[in-house]
Image (cartoon, grey):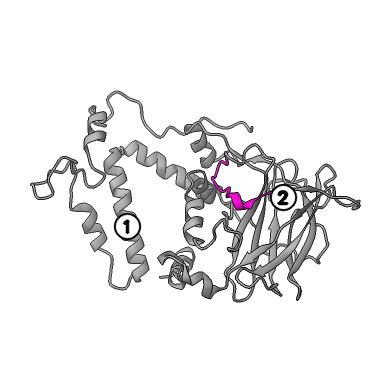
């Protein structure tokens, strides 16, 4: 495991801290909203440790030009964040440590490493949002392929490769694997022509190519487009488990929580086709000991696979057969939640790009 700096201390330990000395009694008796004690009657006069009108006054400041989705999401966020601060009586020192952790994630993030996304991953937020967004996907055999998190190491514009090509370059110590299958409509089973399979994974040393100066650019990455039969095939490596980067805020948080940084062996995919809802997913090697102990909680049973011995192929020791099943936008909408609409997608894009 890489050497790290001293972990960030989130909670000051001074005895003269302004945190109430009756912490245990407060935690057990106080509700999660505005400091109202649990024992109070709904009609009795309510006493507050903190200004009960502050949160609502801030929410009310939202102007009339804000979109309905922005108004709803931000009002909810403000309420939850304020209640969290009240419930735990967050001090200024703790607040500033949290702000600095977010700032440091921003300073470390580049087009080759998304530390903010990694930080949200170790607290399970990315996996939870993935579940909400792709609620239609289940473990049933006739359902669309389940989704999994994108992770911080995807790169846009991976090389377009021909079927049967290898994404492995200048690596001689890996378990060469032939992966193949079909991309189909989950309802009809019909093959999807023109579907794109974007694939990436680490080298045997546990590093993605942008982390490793010894790997060629876009190594272990590629995009494959299906023909009329919906089939795909290419050569890759049987993946290996690896620690997520431990030298930034995400790693420091894991240390504070006394948690390991290991991810089980997996291969990443983005599968998309015209008129179909894209799927971001991962396939996990069943043999890996971290299958039940993923640092970012992304493993789903339907995505756990077996690498099989491959005979008669000098290019590969293993093979991985796997079919991807996509849902049309129309089918996906039938089971979508409020946050998976076009309005939500537009809201997200506008926030990221700084538009109103």
| Vertical comparison of 109 with 264: above or below | below
- Image quadrant in which you'd find residue 183: bottom right
Q: Is residue 293 magenta?
A: no
Dot 1 alpha-carbon crowd within 10 angstroms: few under 14, some 14 to 19, many 20 or more = few
Task: State the predominant SS element of the stretch in magenta.
Answer: loop
The location of residue 69, given as percent across then percent down, is 37, 68
Q: In terms of depth relative to the viewer, which is nearer, 28 or 319?
A: 319
Residue 304 seen anywhere in this rendered image of the structure: yes
- Circle 2 is placed at which residue position? 209
Q: Is residue 301 magenta?
A: yes
Helix, strand or loop at mark 2: helix
The location of residue 89, given as percent across then percent down, is 28, 38
Residue 218 seen anywhere in this rendered image of the structure: no
Chain-order first, disc 2 or disc 1? 1
- Circle 1 is placed at which residue position? 76
Q: What residue appears at the point 78 percent right and 53 percent down from the top-left corner?
A: 236
Segment colored magenta:
294-306
Contact (CB < 8 A) between labels 2 and 1? no
The location of residue 233, given as percent across then percent down, is 79, 62
């Amino acid at each position: 495991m890489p050497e790290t700096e001293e972990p960030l201390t989130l909670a000051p330990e001074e005895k003269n801290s302004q945190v109430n000395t009756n912490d245990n009694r407060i935690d057990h008796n106080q509700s999660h909203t505005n400091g109202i004690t649990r024992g109070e009657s709904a009609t009795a006069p309510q006493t507050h440790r903190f200004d009960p009108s502050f949160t609502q006054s801030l929410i009310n400041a939202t102007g009339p030009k804000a979109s309905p989705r922005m108004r709803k999401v931000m009002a909810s966020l403000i309420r939850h964040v304020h209640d969290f601060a009240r419930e735990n009586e967050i001090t200024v020192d703790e607040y500033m440590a949290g702000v600095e952790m977010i700032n440091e994630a921003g300073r470390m993030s580049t087009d080759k490493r998304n530390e903010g996304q990694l930080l949200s991953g170790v607290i399970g937020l990315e996996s939870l949002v993935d579940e909400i967004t792709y609620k239609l996907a289940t473990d049933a055999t006739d359902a669309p392929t389940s989704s999994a998190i994108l992770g911080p190491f995807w790169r846009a514009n991976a090389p377009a490769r021909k079927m049967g090509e290898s994404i492995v370059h200048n690596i001689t110590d890996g378990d060469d694997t032939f992966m193949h299958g079909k991309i189909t409509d989950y309802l009809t089973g019909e093959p999807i022509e023109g579907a794109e399979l974007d694939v990436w994974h680490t080298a045997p040393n546990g590093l993605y190519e942008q982390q490793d100066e010894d790997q060629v650019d876009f190594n272990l990455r590629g995009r494959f487009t299906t023909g009329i039969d919906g089939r795909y095939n290419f050569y890759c490596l049987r993946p290996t488990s690896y620690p997520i980067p431990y030298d930034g805020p995400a790693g420091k948080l894991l240390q504070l929580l006394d948690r390991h940084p290991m991810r089980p062996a997996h291969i990443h995919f983005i599968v998309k086709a015209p008129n179909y809802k894209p799927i971001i997913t991962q396939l996990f090697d069943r043999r890996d000991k971290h299958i039940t102990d993923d640092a970012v909680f992304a493993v789903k049973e339907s995505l756990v696979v077996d690498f099989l011995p491959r005979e008669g192929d000098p290019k590969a020791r293993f093979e991985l057969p796997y079919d991807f099943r996509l849902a049309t936008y129309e089918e996906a909408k039938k089971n979508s939640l409020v946050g998976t609409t076009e309005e939500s997608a537009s809201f997200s894009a506008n926030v990221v790009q700084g538009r109103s």
